[in-house]
């Protein structure tokens, strides 16, 4: 909303400098985007008087002028054919920035300096209308009113000294969408009342009812509809002062009648509409809902398919305006208009909002009506606009007005307990003070039972409906900065909320292990969202097709991160991300919203070399076992439980060589090598390894309990054996565990050999067994017996050939 | 024999003085202290002396051995502290580095803010990112067809389900499940249907705070948030609470702090205002209490919310919010 200082002065007098005014109103809840001094554009321009003109000695078309600019007389070289002694002209002094350059019409402003033109000194410039951005005339200089004061600043002379405030209005304060609304707030600051002008109307003897009838069929959505009619107007441009105000407030002037409706709206906040009476059929106005499927052309020339139930203003035959949103092209004021019908109505806010939303249009009128206009302002808006039409467009006003207002809307009365003000704010305000603050807002409190204040609220304050709304008003006027800050330093340790998030421990562990955290966007294209085979959730109104689905896995986003970093030349990458993934799954347990399953996960991704390059050793590429080890380490560290890996092959999913990860006996996630097709699609080089685990399964281990450290030595025996290449290490390990019995406390594969030194079809596997008893030191005999059991089992189950025991 | 011992002692003292390298120290040690060295020879000779002389001679020999060992140790350490001019180890070779992980700058900021509120007695709660209209809007006093809904452009996944536009629905979920007193912060991702550019993104992070109990006042809200501002931005930070509108709080305030980039003088970042808006807050609206079944006469409370991404943006001087989600290691490693 653009607010003009000069306009505010019509309703309240104040002398605060613009920045201070903005600051003070900010602290009352108005948000200022900018404070613009409109005259700034003409800083350095003054009214000058041409004292003499002489031909330029070296140029035919130039004139050398002596110009009185008040404090001094300047010599200026001028190229305009119309310059003459005695003229009052607009002079740009050296240093001034000329808005437009006639040699470069769309170029930037240029700054004047003292120059020599063909050998003659020139200190400034006599400007044309075009150069000053005041009009199109570039042929000659602007000749000002001969009464203009020599030396006066040009902006003062032109009346451009106004200040425009750009104010952001919160949706609860439609009353602020007007100059009188802002003037009322200034009234709080300067402790004066703002006043709208008094309207006196001269009516003719002919009653309006002879020409027009109004029938409201949809009384719910149109609680009040009022109209006046003026005959014999002359449509033309509105006067300069009105055009200037509208332009400075951001509206384009059209013609006098339309400008008046806009002007009154910006004055008092109530939107109006004007019809050409000649275009209304059947001398009637009917307010009713549109029939389904109707097409209607608004006055901006656009055709709309009206949603069912749109409230329309109609004549006897057809629709003429979308109520409270925009008028129709079929009945708008035009150059041939002679008789004018002015409409001032009060519309149901939610009906207007539904219509504006459905049509995708937002107008000055709809914005005000949907936030809630003032039903009582209908009268003023209508009378004020009628009087301005008579004044600026002539004509005669028909007697009386039509005002269909079957159920009067009363001013609201809201109760306020002064003690409650202090209970909410933490203040110690006395009831009299509370009442005084409310009166500043033109709220009228009356003391009722038990000290309760019965407060009558002005009808323009649609936001004040409850006690808490009054408390807010008191706080606002009292001043937020005057409410004393207190802290009770009360800490309730007995509350049911944790002090850390589940993700914190996981994140800290991964960062400690050299993984960098990525945060990727949850929205992606259909291909990525479908890549792990789950049913993704579709966004109905996405920013674009590349963001039309929610991720079902963190991996596709991380692949894009790898791609981006590779494109910048970084190939050794270790990332993790913690975030939510989503899928549509009516069967999923624990769903909160509809069929949408949501889960927080952590994913890690490895690419490139396993460690930074170092001169002491050749680089090694990351492989699946780096990932498997990292997963095992972290799962054990965080959950204090061993994680199990189960190999499974499936055609869907993102990975090959996939292992399912089991924690506390249930499925927690998977790891594997990203399928080549996804790597290629993401534009990545090299092999990529990922793991993705549900965060819920990474809950820190249960109760931590100390276990006695062993008191007896632990002995190691290395067993080296040949087995068929097809035998898996895992199955061998399980056999060792089973055969060794309770003395075995650890088994670790330490060597794998496949090659010429092994018999054909065989590989060598070497394990270290760790044996210990909690009761005693083991004897050689006991150790040997266990080893024999193990060797025997391996021979029997796998046909293993023992190479050595050490 | 005693004479031999004294002579050996003198010889050792003379020879050690001329020892200049580690190799010589070793040669000296071998000569005197090795199993076949001169002192060992005297110990061997001890076997042949008179039994009554043995204790005294043995003691003297032991003392000699200890003394020579001390000479060796002292010399060795003296040589070691000199610059290893002759060492073949090039100490300028680079050390063996590890990959070090980093938390995302948004997480770092979020963690810091979280820890301040946790230290003030707040717990942590979270909720789903796909929300229903009820929790995201209606229970928070955004009636259907209300213009306040335009304040937050929404992504919908169905007629009634949406991507939460703020973390405030977690407030509602917390209050639905717990009776007062409640003191909790709620960090998380939120989504707004806004075009992506250097200044805005369609996904960002918020921290929501909620405190409900008997006797909680606006004064307490101010005290708590001022404490946060001083801890997070420094104790000399100026602040102001400005009235504003949120559907779910009343009275509502925007908190501004003096711009820490220009110290309030006005710069590009604060749009010449000298102030930065960092936080929205207010007293929980009675209508919100009504939707969760709290007695608004008995309890009062405050709520606040802030955008983490923007706070981190200002703090680190990042000029393009999209950098957060590109995850370029050259960017992430700067924090």
Image (cartoon, rainbow, N blue to C red):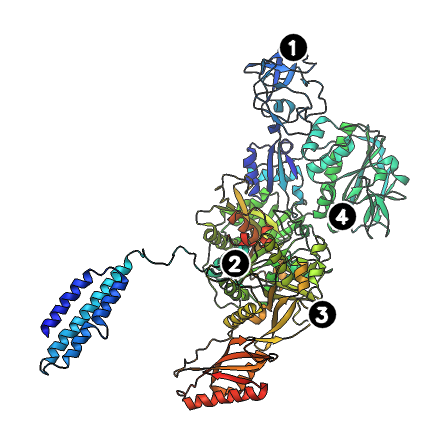
Residue B166, visible in the rendered structure: no
Mark nearest the camera among 1 and 4 is 1
Q: Residues within 10 Å of mark 2 (few under 14, many from 20)?
A: many
Mark 4–mark 2 contact, CB under 8 Å? no
Chain of residue at mark 4: A
Disc 2 and disc 1 on one polypeptide chain: no
Q: Earlier in the sequence, mark 4 or mark 3?
A: 4
Identify the residue under disc 4.
Answer: A360
If the image is split into quadrants, where does the C terminus of chain A sit? bottom left
What is the secondary structure assignment of the residue under circle 4?
A: loop
Question: What is the spatial separation of the Cα atoms under label 2 and label 1, in whole angstroms?
Answer: 75 Å
- The residue labelled by disc 2 is B103
Q: CA distance from mark 3 to mark 2?
A: 35 Å
The subunit carrying tag 2 is B
Whether A431 is drawn above or below B292: the answer is above
The residue at the point 64 percent across, 44 percent down is: A169
């Amino acid at each position: 909303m653009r607010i003009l200082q000069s306009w505010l002065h019509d309703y309240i007098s104040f002398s605060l400098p613009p920045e201070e005014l903005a600051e003070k109103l900010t602290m009352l809840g108005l948000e200022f985007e900018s404070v613009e001094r409109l005259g700034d554009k003409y800083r350095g321009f003054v009214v000058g008087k041409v004292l003499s003109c002489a031909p330029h000695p070296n140029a035919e078309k130039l004139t050398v002028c002596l110009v009185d600019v008040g404090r001094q007389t300047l010599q200026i070289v001028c190229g305009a054919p119309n310059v003459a002694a005695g003229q009052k002209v607009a002079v740009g002094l050296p240093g001034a920035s000329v808005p437009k350059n006639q040699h470069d019409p769309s170029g930037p402003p240029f700054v004047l300096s003292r120059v020599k033109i063909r050998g003659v000194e020139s200190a400034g410039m006599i400007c044309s209308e075009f150069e000053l951005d005041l009009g199109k005339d570039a042929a000659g200089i602007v000749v000002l009113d001969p009464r203009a004061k020599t030396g006066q600043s040009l902006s003062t002379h032109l009346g451009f000294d106004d200040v425009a405030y750009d104010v952001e209005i919160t949706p609860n304060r439609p009353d602020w969408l007007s100059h009188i609304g802002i003037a009322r707030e200034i009234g709080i600051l300067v402790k004066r009342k703002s006043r709208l002008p008094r309207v006196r109307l001269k009516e003719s003897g002919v009653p309006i009812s002879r020409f027009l009838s109004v029938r409201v069929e949809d009384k719910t959505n149109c609680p009040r509809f009022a109209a006046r009619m003026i005959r014999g107007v002359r449509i033309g441009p509105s006067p300069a002062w009105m055009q200037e105000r509208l332009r400075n407030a951001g509206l384009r002037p059209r013609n006098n009648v339309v400008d008046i409706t806009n002007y009154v709206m910006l004055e008092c906040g109530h939107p109006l509409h004007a019809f050409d009476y000649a275009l209304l059929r059947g001398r009637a106005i009917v307010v009713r809902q549109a029939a389904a499927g109707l097409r209607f052309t608004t006055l901006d020339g656009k055709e709309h398919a009206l949603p069912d139930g749109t409230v329309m203003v109609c004549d006897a035959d057809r629709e003429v305006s979308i109520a409270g949103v925009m008028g129709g092209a079929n009945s708008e004021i035009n150059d041939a208009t002679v008789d004018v019908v002015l409409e001032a109505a009060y519309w149901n806010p939610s009906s207007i909002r539904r219509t504006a939303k459905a049509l995708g249009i937002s107008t000055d009128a709809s914005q005000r009506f949907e936030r809630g206009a003032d039903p009582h302002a209908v009268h003023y808006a209508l009378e004020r606009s009628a009087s301005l039409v008579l004044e600026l467009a002539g004509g005669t006003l028909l007697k009386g007005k039509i005002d269909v207002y079957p159920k009067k809307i009363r001013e609201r009365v809201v109760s306020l307990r002064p003690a409650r003000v202090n209970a909410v704010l933490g203040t110690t305000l006395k009831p009299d003070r509370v009442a005084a603050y409310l009166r500043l807002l033109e709220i009228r409190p009356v003391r009722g039972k038990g000290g309760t204040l019965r407060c009558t609220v002005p009808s323009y304050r649609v936001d004040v409906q409850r006690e808490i709304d009054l408390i807010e008003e008191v706080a606002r006027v009292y001043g937020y900065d005057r409410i004393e800050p207190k802290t009770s330093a009360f800490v309730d340790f007995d509350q049911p909320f944790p002090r850390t998030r589940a993700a914190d421990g996981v994140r800290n562990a991964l960062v400690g292990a050299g993984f960098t955290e990525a945060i990727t966007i949850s929205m992606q294209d259909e291909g990525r969202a479908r890549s792990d085979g789950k049913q993704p959730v579709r966004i109905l109104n996405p920013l674009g097709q590349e963001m039309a689905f929610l991720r079902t896995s963190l991996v596709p986003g991380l692949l894009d991160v790898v791609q981006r970093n590779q494109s910048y030349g970084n190939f050794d990458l270790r990332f993790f991300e913690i975030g939510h993934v989503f899928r549509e799954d009516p069967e999923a347990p624990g769903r909160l919203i509809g069929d949408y399953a949501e889960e927080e996960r952590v994913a890690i991704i490895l690419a490139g070399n396993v460690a930074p390059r170092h001169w002491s050793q050749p680089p090694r590429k990351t492989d699946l076992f780096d990932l498997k080890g990292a997963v095992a380490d972290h799962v054990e560290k965080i959950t204090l439980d061993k994680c199990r890996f189960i190999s499974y092959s499936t055609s869907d999913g993102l990975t090959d060589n996939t292992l399912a990860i089991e924690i506390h006996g249930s499925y927690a996630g998977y790891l594997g090598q990203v399928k080549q097709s996804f790597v290629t699609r993401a534009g990545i080089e090299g092999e990529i390894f990922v793991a993705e685990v549900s965060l819920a399964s990474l809950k820190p281990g249960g109760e931590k309990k100390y276990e006695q450290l062993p008191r007896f030595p632990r002995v190691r025996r290395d067993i080296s054996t040949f087995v068929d290449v097809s035998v898996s290490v895992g199955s061998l390990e399980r056999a060792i565990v089973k055969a060794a019995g309770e003395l075995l406390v650890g088994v670790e594969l330490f060597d794998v050999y496949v090659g010429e030194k092994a018999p054909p079809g065989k590989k060598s596997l070497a394990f270290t067994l760790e044996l210990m008893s909690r009761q005693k030191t083991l004897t050689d005999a006991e150790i040997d017996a266990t080893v024999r059991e193990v060797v025997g089992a391996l021979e029997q189950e796998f046909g293993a050939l023992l190479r050595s025991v050490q | 024999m005693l004479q031999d011992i004294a002579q050996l002692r003198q010889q050792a003292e003379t020879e050690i003085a001329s020892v200049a390298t580690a190799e010589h120290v070793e040669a000296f040690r071998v000569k005197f202290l090795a199993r076949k060295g001169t002192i060992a020879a005297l110990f061997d000779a001890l076997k042949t002396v008179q039994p009554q002389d043995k204790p005294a001679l043995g003691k003297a020999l032991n003392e000699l051995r200890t003394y020579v060992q001390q000479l060796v140790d002292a010399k060795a350490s003296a040589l070691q502290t000199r610059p290893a001019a002759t060492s073949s180890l090039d100490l300028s070779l680079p050390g063996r580095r590890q990959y070090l992980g980093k938390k995302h700058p948004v997480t770092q900021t979020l963690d810091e803010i979280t820890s301040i509120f946790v230290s003030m007695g707040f717990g942590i709660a979270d909720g789903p990112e796909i929300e229903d209209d009820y929790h995201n809007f209606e229970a928070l006093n955004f009636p259907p067809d209300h213009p306040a809904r335009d304040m937050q452009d929404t992504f919908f996944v169905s007629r009634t389900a949406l991507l939460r536009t703020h973390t405030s629905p977690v407030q509602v979920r917390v209050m639905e499940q717990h009776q007062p007193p409640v003191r909790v912060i709620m960090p998380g991702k939120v989504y707004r249907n806004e075009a992506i550019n250097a200044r805005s993104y369609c996904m960002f992070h918020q921290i929501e705070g909620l405190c409900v109990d008997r006797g909680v006042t606006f004064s307490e809200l101010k005290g708590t948030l001022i404490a946060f501002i001083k801890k997070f931005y420094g104790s000399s930070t100026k602040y102001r609470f400005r009235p504003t509108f949120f559907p779910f709080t009343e009275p509502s305030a925007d908190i501004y702090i003096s711009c820490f980039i220009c110290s309030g003088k006005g710069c590009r970042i604060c749009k010449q205002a000298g102030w930065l808006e960092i936080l929205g807050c207010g007293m929980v609206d009675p209508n919100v209490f009504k939707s969760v079944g709290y007695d608004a006469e008995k309890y009062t409370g405050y709520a606040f919310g802030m955008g983490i991404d923007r706070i981190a943006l200002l703090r680190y001087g990042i000029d393009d919010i999209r950098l957060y989600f590109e995850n370029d290691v050259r960017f992430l490693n700067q924090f």
